[in-house]
């Protein structure tokens, strides 16, 4: 009887240890409640740790009912758009925050997360209010990003090898379907290709 109890104890310990590991033999990380909500229904290659990191850097809070996000006690709609802008197999993630109360007439702001040489996703895009539009022009393998919104002239940011920096302004009349793609359509092309 003592051997049976010992065997059961060893088996339970083994099950506990193996359930805490993923298929690569390393401990798996659980998604936080915020990261779970942020990435619900988002098709991405990100690990749980990467999702948790992105959520943490956004500095958002969950609403009291845990079904939406708030920032500075103001409701915020948040949309995640996976992409692979430089076609290297590593995803870049756009996160668009929407709130007229927080972002004025533009109604939105956004951040781009790009994996650095250390393998960590870092936040880029201190662009101010506006929505991301991907341009056909590129620098160092990454497309330029126009910050769209109300008005007739828009800032364009280019990749300098380590960050997106202000490059120029672009007039509304110069923006066409041939030289620009809104982030939703750009991300959809990427995720559709992953099927």
Image (tube, rainbow, N blue to C red):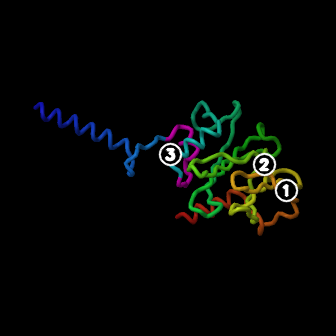
At a point 50% along the width and 49% down the height, the residue shown is 47
Judged left or right of residue 28, residue 9 is: left
Which residue position is annotated with label 3? 48
At a point 57% along the width and 42% down the height, the residue shown is 53
Crowdedness near tag 1: few (<14), some (14–19) or many (≥20) residues, C-alpha within 10 Å: few
Q: Position of residue 3 (x, y in %)?
A: 12, 34
Between marks 1 and 2, how big is the CA–CA gap? Answer: 16 Å
Which residue position is annotated with label 1? 168
Which residue position is annotated with label 2? 130
Q: Nearer the viewer, mark 3 or mark 1?
A: 1
Between marks 3 and 1, how big is the CA–CA gap? Answer: 37 Å
Give the total number of marks visible in the rendering. Answer: 3
For residue 39: magenta?
Answer: yes
Element under disc 2:
loop
Whether residue 109 is situated above or below residue 143 in the rendered picture: above
Quadrant holding the N terminus:
top left
Q: Report the disc number at residue 97.
A: none
Q: Which residues are magenta?
A: 31-45
Q: Position of residue 170 (x, y in %)?
A: 86, 59
**Circles 3 and 2: CB atoms closer than 8 Å:** no
Element under disc 3:
helix
Judged left or right of residue 102, residue 85 is: left
């Amino acid at each position: 009887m003592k051997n049976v109890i010992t065997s059961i104890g060893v088996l339970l310990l083994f099950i506990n240890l193996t359930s805490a590991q993923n298929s690569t033999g390393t401990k798996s990380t659980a998604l936080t409640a915020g990261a779970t909500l942020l990435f619900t229904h988002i098709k991405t290659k990100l690990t749980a740790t990467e999702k948790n990191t992105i959520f943490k850097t956004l500095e958002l809070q969950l609403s009291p009912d845990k079904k939406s996000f708030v920032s500075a006690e103001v409701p915020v709609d948040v949309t995640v758009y996976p992409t692979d802008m430089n076609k290297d197999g590593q995803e870049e993630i756009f996160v668009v925050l929407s709130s007229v109360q927080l972002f004025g007439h533009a109604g939105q702001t956004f951040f781009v997360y790009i994996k650095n040489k250390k393998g960590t996703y870092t936040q880029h895009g201190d662009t101010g209010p506006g929505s991301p539009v991907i341009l056909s022009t590129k620098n160092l393998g990454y497309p330029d990003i126009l910050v769209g919104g109300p008005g007739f002239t828009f800032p364009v940011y280019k990749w300098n090898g380590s960050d997106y920096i202000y490059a120029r302004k672009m007039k509304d009349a110069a923006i066409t379907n041939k030289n620009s793609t809104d982030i939703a359509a750009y991300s959809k092309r990427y995720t559709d290709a992953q099927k």
